[in-house]
Image: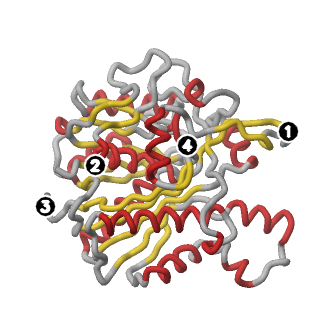
Amino acid sequence: MGSREIGICGIGAVTGYGWGREPFWEGLASGKPAATLTGGYGLHRDESAWVARVPDGGDPADGPSRFSRAMRAAAREAVADAGERGWTPGGRVGLLHAVVLGEVDLWREFYLSRQTDLKPREYLALMPSTPMSTLMQEYGFHGPAMNVSAMCASGNAGLLTAKAWLDAGIVDDVVFVATDLSATPENVLHFARLGVAVVDDDPLEVCRPFQEGSRGFPAGEASVAFVLSRNATRPYAFTLGGAMSHDGHHVTSVDPGLDQVRGCFRDALANAKVPASAVRFLNAHGPGTVQCDRAEAAMLEEFFPPETGIYSVKPLVGHCQGAASAVELAVAALGYDRGYLPAPPAVAPGHPQLLSGRTPVGGGLTVKSSLGMGGHNSVVVLAPPA
């Protein structure tokens, strides 16, 4: 690989399947959704919903919330993993944190009960800079530290920002984390009111990306971390390039003309300097909504050859909002390492190029697309390590 390609040399994950990269992969490989029927949801708090919620856990020393503990645990696992795979940090390690709604549980408690009854240290824990600062202190990193927010495209946006830092020589390495633990009853309720979150049935039944009868997505939570470097000796995958754009059309809906989505795919391939014919997999945003599935299916048919397979893991992990595309990037990278993709089993007639169940990975490029709410388009191009 040339100097422009950035290696993903460490991965950490906290998801609805549990704390750690291996529970994440084992859960995906089982083909069973991470969501469980959880009480306390609904308008009157006496209903249940299918939610892929991160379970309690982590190190209490990392903070009082699941959010801070999950962020630190995922980052710590990625750094340790990278070290075991031969990475040595350079003198300028930067930190990027993709986050849309941070510390939801603590802010909820602050507004509803504690308010001024907080010690200064507890109040500072609510600030978005605090988990980043504590992580930088833990490892003695001194590169830039910054939050990235582009709705559910935040993972792609963070990865591309990390690559830009590395290409520009601003840093030697980047630890990139995407965290979203916002599946509270209030947030899930409002996504249900928007008509996109479906919580009344098994996720494989309601969320059928690129299949007939899909009604939307289950809510999910996750924190996923990557170590990105040119000095990776055993990378999971290479980040070749990508692109981002904005529809400038509507606060929730995709522009039906798809001009900006189409341009984002075209620009990503050009930026990565690869032909569309080399793409073997389209790891889609795939939330199971009509407009998003239609848009990505159109891009599949316009850009890529008939042998390119399309898949989305949202029926399994749920829609993890600000961490969604990072979770899905981790699936693609781990798939190269493990030799197969854990695509959800199809449950209804669907697109002829839709993958169903465990699919061998025999090389070829992966395009990861994400269409964030509000018009955030993003496309990343990944390559296998060899």
Check disc 3: other Cα within 10 Å, few if <14, some if 14-19, many if 20+. few
Pointer 2 with pointer 3, Cβ within 8 A: no
| Callout 4 secondary element | loop
Q: Nearer the viewer, mark 1 or mark 2?
A: 1
Q: Is residue 231 left or right of residue 256?
A: left
Camera-side residue: 52 or 272? 52
Q: Which mark is residue 2?
A: 3
Q: Which mark is residue 381?
A: 2
Label 4 vs 3, first from the N-terminus: 3
Which amino acid, mark 3? Answer: Gly
Residue 303 point in image, percent of width and height: 25, 34
Pointer 1 with pointer 2, Cβ within 8 A: no
Residue 96 point in image, percent of width and height: 44, 69
Alpha-carbon span between mark 3 and mark 1: 57 Å
Alpha-carbon span between mark 2 and mark 3: 15 Å
Alpha-carbon span between mark 4 and mark 3: 34 Å
Alpha-carbon span between mark 1 and mark 2: 44 Å
